[in-house]
Amino acid sequence: MGGEIRPCEDAKQLQHYINTYWRRGHVLATDDAMFRFTYSTQWVDRSVWPGGMSVLGLYDGTRMTGFLGSIVTPYPRPQSYWLALWHVFPETKGTGLGGKLLAKMQSIAEACDGWIGTFGAGPDALPVYLKRGFCVRGARRWVYSPDGEVKKTQRTTGPARPHSAETLPGDAWFDHRFWKHPIYSYQSQSGVVYRTEENDWGVVTHVCHHPEGADPTFAKIHAAESARANGRRFLMDGWGFDCPGENWTLAPDDLPTVFHPPEARGSTIYAVGRPFLMTRIHKGDCDQDRPNGAAAVEQAAMSHAG
């Protein structure tokens, strides 16, 4: 089976592949706006990616037999590649073709003095990244309670200082990632960016950006009161390497991590990066709050319209 690697230039072919081999009904296969939002950001270098999509395809002639996608962002380096979906035909596994996709994407990132990594790697994937020189660190999910619902936790150390080569996300990225999101609607107050959703589990507020010293109590109080008035459960969560501050505690492993449908996937996940690891996690890194399928897209769209 052939193994030519080249930039993908046919969006419909890639969407068909995702729908057929990754997950039927996946949002990137069914929603064109979400597809462009993910793979055709304003930071994609069109001289490197002629089709305007930051995706490498694996081809046997004209047939796609695998791909590696990335979200191009301006942080933690001005040209950064956040890995987003990686798949090869099962019959090619063990041939090294999947590794060649990653090596090629690494070389593209390194050619522009950029960064490559992801937030959301599972433990089984860590050896693949480690042997290729990536830094790895476990990130944990935290839940917030200012009113004694859970044991209060006081952080004893401050947040890690940015790496000397790290560029922090600026207004342009926040504008793209949150305020121009094609599906979700976000809110911001006192520097805290968050999104509240109603789902089969209850009402959930995701804290996506939590500046040092910021208190998200206002968001919890508003959403929690609404949930309680309707007899529903409420949760506020966020991801971080360290405890975000007072009133945050580790989420239990049996608490749902995704909600379309509700499913517990544990409260530890791994961030990987090369040549360094970013110091702060924003929940939207690598679009981790992306909906899980077409049904979730429809639900989010209805919620947004309301």
Image (cartoon, grey):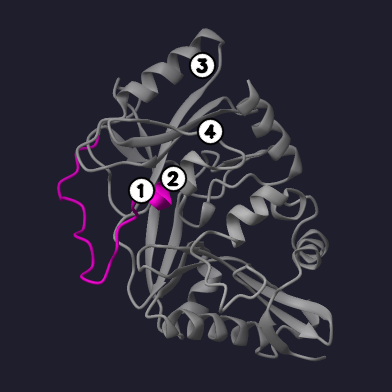
126 shown above or below 119: below
Q: Nearer the viewer, mark 2 or mark 4?
A: 2
Q: Are marks 3 and 4 in contact (CB under 8 Å)?
A: no
Please name the residue shown 57% across and 37% down the image: 184
Q: CA distance from mark 1 to mark 4?
A: 17 Å
Q: Residue at x 84, y 82 (%)?
A: 62
Q: Quadrant of residue 305?
A: top right
Which quadrant of the structure image shows residue 183? Answer: top right
Tell me which corner region of the image, top left, top right, bottom left or bottom right, holds residue 36.
bottom right
Contact, CB < 8 Å: mark 2 with mark 3? no
Q: Which residue is mark 2?
A: 175
Query: Which mark lies nearer to you, 3 or 4?
Result: 4
Residue indicated by mark 3: 227
Give the class, few, some or many, for how many residues have Cα within 10 Å of label 1's Cα (few <14, many ≥20): few
Give 182 or 289, whichever is nearer the viewer. 182
Residue visible at 37% across and 67% down? 78
Range of magenta residues: 153-174
Q: CA distance from mark 3 to mark 4?
A: 18 Å
Look at discs 2 and 3 and give the one toward the viewer. 2
